[in-house]
Image (spheres, helix red, strand yellow):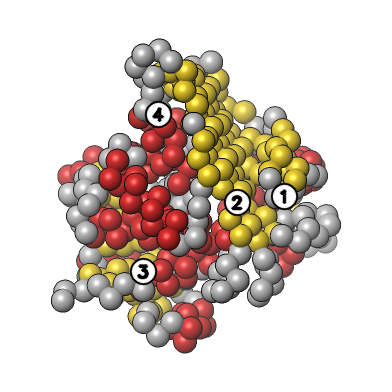
Amino acid sequence: MKRHRVLVLGAGMIGNTIADDLSRSDRLEVTVADINKQVLHDMQVANPRLNVTRQNLTDPAAIRAMADEADIVVGALPSRMGRAALEAVIAAGTNYVDISFMSEDALELDDLARAGGVTAVTDCGVAPGLSNLLVGYAADQLAEVDEVRVYVGGLPVTRHWPYEYKAGFAPHDVIEEYTRPTRIIRNGSPVEVPALTEPETLEIEGLGSVTAFLTDGLRSLMQTIPATNMVEKTIRYPGHCELMAVLRHMGLFSSDTIAVGPDRTEVRPIDVTSALLFPQWTFTQHEEDLTIMRIHVSGRDGHGETRVFEWDLLDRYDQDSGTRSMSRCTAFPAAITAQLILDGRFERPGVCAPEMMAQNQDVFDHIMSELKQRGVVLTESH
C-alpha cells in the first residue's frame, strides 16, 4: 500500500496536534519540521510514528526542498512566516493546507497556485477556518445575505487576575489581533475600525457571561461573501478587553523602536511586552482550556423567505489525551482537509479559502462528521 508523504511545518501546540492526528492513519507517513531540537525529540518520544527533521523554517529554500519530497504540506507556523512558506510550497508544486493567520492576503497568490496546479487551502483552523466553512455553507443556501456575525475565543477554565487569559497559540499573534485594524462590512461597504472596540456581552450556556469585541478575523469572507453587514468578534472573560485597550494606549504593543536607559538602548515595546506576557499567558502542563464559537448568518432564500442559520460550539480540554481544546479545534479542520485533498475528494487548483469548500455538500458533510468523531461537536439551529 502506497503511503502518502505529509510534511508538517512547525512543532508548536497546533502543529503537534495536526501531526498526531494525521499519524493515526496507516496510509500516511508524517514528518514534522522545526528548528527546536528538544521539541522535536519530545514529539517523537511521545509519538514514535512521527518522523522529525530539524530545519530553519525562515528559509524558503529549505521549505521548498522539503515540499518537493512531500505529497502535501500542512503549515502551522507563526503568522509572520506564513506568506513566505506559502510561496515556497506553491513554487514546489505541492498541495498545501495552512493555519498561520498571515497578515498578507493569501488570495493574491491564487494565479500562481493555479498556474502550478496547486490546491492551497489557507486560514484552515477554527476561526478563520471552521467559521468560514459554516458561513460559506449558510450563504450558499441564501439568495441574499443580510448579516454575518462570528464570535470565537479560547479561554482558560480557571480565571487568574488580571488577564484572565492564556494563549492557545503564540502570544505575539494574540497581541497582533489586538492591534491590527479591523475590517468589517457595514451597510454593504467595507470599513476599517480599531480592534478591541464595540464590546458586547454574550451568555454562554454552561459558562455564563463573556465579552466579545471586534478583531480582524473575517479575512477572505470580506471578498467571497456578499453580505450587508459582517463582523468578527473575539471572546474573552469580562475585563480583559479594557485591560488590553489600556496597554495598547500606553504604547506597549507598538512595533516602533524607543530609546531607554542611560545608554539609550533601542527596543521595540511589543518585544518587551511579549517577553513579559509570555510566561503569564502560557498554560501549565495540565491546565484546562475551552473554546467558544458562535456563528450567526441571516438573509433571504430564493423565495424571499427570511432564514437564519446559527451554530454554537463549546469545546473543552481533552482529559484522555491531554490535548488543549484550542489545539484540537484549530488542528482538526486542517488535518481533515489535508486528507480530503490527498484522497482526491477536494480538488481546486489555486489559493482556496475554507468557505469555498462549503459549496461541495459532500465535503462539508465529511468535515462536520470527522470533527464530530474527534469530539468537536457543533449545535445547529435554523
Front one among 239 and 296: 296
Q: Position of residue 208 (x, y in %)?
A: 75, 46
| 264 is higher (above) or lower (below) than 310 | below
Q: Which mark is residue 84?
A: none
Closer to viewer: mark 1 or mark 4: 1
Helix, strand or loop status at disc 2: strand
Q: Choose top left, top right, bottom left or bottom right for residue 261.
A: bottom right
- Where disc 3 sits, the SS reads helix
Q: Which residue is mark 4?
A: 139
User: Which numbered disc covers residue 207?
Assistant: 1
Name the spot of residue 278 as percent of width and height, x first. Answer: 69, 64
* Residue 113 makes an appearance in the image: no
First in residue order: circle 4 vs circle 2: 4
Q: Residues within 10 Å of mark 1 (few under 14, many from 20)?
A: few
Q: Considering only order in the chain, which callout, 1 or 2, is on the residue closer to the N terminus?
A: 1
Between the C-alphas of marks 2 and 1, the distance is: 9 Å
Q: Which mark is residue 22?
A: 3
| Residue 314 numbered mark, or none | 2
Q: Nearer the viewer, mark 1 or mark 3?
A: 1
Q: Amino acid at mark 3?
A: Leu
Q: Answer yes or no: do the residues labelled 1 and 3 have beta carbons within 8 Å?
A: no
Residue sitting at x 68%, y 43%: 204
Disc 4 crowd rating (10 Å Cα; few below 14, some 14-19, many 20+) is many
Q: Disc 2 versus disc 3: distance between alpha carbons?
A: 24 Å
User: Which tag, 1 or 3, sits closer to the chain's start?
Assistant: 3
Q: Residue at x 51, y 79 (%)?
A: 39
In the displayed structure, does residue 364 sit left or right of residue 237? left
Q: Are marks 2 and 1 in contact (CB under 8 Å)?
A: yes
In the depicted structure, whether residue 165 falls above or below residue 110: below
